[in-house]
Structures are given as C-alpha cells and as structure tokens.
Amino acid sequence: MKRSLPWNEQIDVISSDDSSSSDSEMDGCDGKQPIDDECDSKQPIDNEYNGKELSYEDALIKSAEMYQEYMKHIPIPTHRGSVIPFTTWMGLGKSIKQLYDQPLHYLTNILLKQWDQLRIGSEDECKPLDTLVHPCKAEATIWLIEEVHRHTSSHLHLAKLWLSDPLHHTFIDSIFPKL
C-alpha cells in the first residue's frame, strides 16, 4: 500500500535548539524526580513483583518487558506538517518529542547519539545538519527507525544493554502520551 505524504501543505517551522528549563529540572534517575547527587543507577527498578523479591537482573528484565510492551502501543504519527530545522540528530530527536508529545525508544535515542558522535572530526562537523540532510528526510528516517525499535526489539536485548549501562535511564524519555 502506497501512502502519499502531504508535502505541499502549509508547514510550521520549529527550532530544535530551543531548550526549556523544565527538561533539566526533572531529569533525575527515573525522569520523574529532581536531580540529586545521590542518584543510584538501580533506583528506578522495583525489586518486587507480585509479592516476590526479584534479583536486580530479573527486575531489569521485567522493567524492559513492560517498557517494550508500552512502546508497542504508541502509534507512529502518520501526518507530519512541520519542517524542523536542526543542527544535531539529538536536537532533532528532542524537537520531535516536543512537537508530537511522544517519547522516542531507548534504542532510537542511543542511535541518534551515535550518529552525532560519527560527525566528530568530519569536514562537515561544524555545519548544521539540516544543510546536509533535508529536514523532511531526516524526520522520516527517525520515524522509520522508531517504528522498527517499537515493534521488533527484544526486551531481553534491552535488559542486557541496560545491565551494561548504569546510566541507561538517561536515554529513556519521560513523556507519557495518552493511548
């Protein structure tokens, strides 16, 4: 089935470089609390399930399973009516989250960070990314990758990644759209 996108409709332009103070104020260990110096990387994990005590690894697997199941139920936007200027992949991701009031998958956030890191040392490193990649193509790419991550990622793979990264919670968005 072929879908046509309304590229010729009127569009809004938003900036990916707008930063809000609320993002930094509520970015603690679990994304729901203020930052403090006593953040424990294991804090967001509930070590009890149905009255049974779980190991940290088992609790992480259960959390990853619930996360992946939740992400599967968030629909990918089908209508994109804005061209988003951006200088970095992570900046574009942040703008997408704000514009569509949706989280991006942990794996998508990690990928955007890696793409920004790949630019370090290139001859175009200092150029705004939207002068190298058309904003509509860049946004469509992120949504395509997001769809793959939401619908095909294994919660066991996520748990394995989270176990190896004590700061994994920093790449889990605390945006909860109404389903």
Image: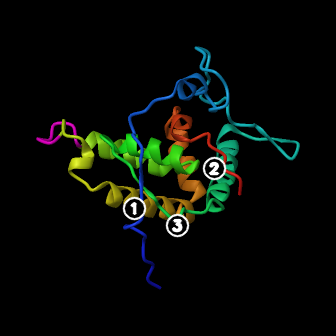
Residue occupied by mark 2:
64
Image point (62%, 43%), residue name: 175
Q: How is the image coloured?
A: rainbow
Residue occupied by mark 1:
140
Q: Is residue 100 magenta?
A: no
Q: In the rendered image of this protein, does residue 143 appear above or below residue 103?
A: below
Which residue is at the front of the view, 127 or 154?
Answer: 127
Contact check, label 2 and label 3, Cβ < 8 Å: no
Furthest-front residue in this view: 10
Q: Residues within 10 Å of mark 1 (few under 14, many from 20)?
A: few
- Is tag 1's residue or tag 3's residue first in the polypeptide sequence? 3
Span highlighted in magenta in the image: 119-124
Residue occupied by mark 3:
78
Identify residue type, mark 2.
Ala
| In the displayed structure image, the side of residue 16 where residue 35 appears, left or right | right
Marks 1 and 2, how far apart at CA: 26 Å
Image point (47%, 50%), residue name: 107
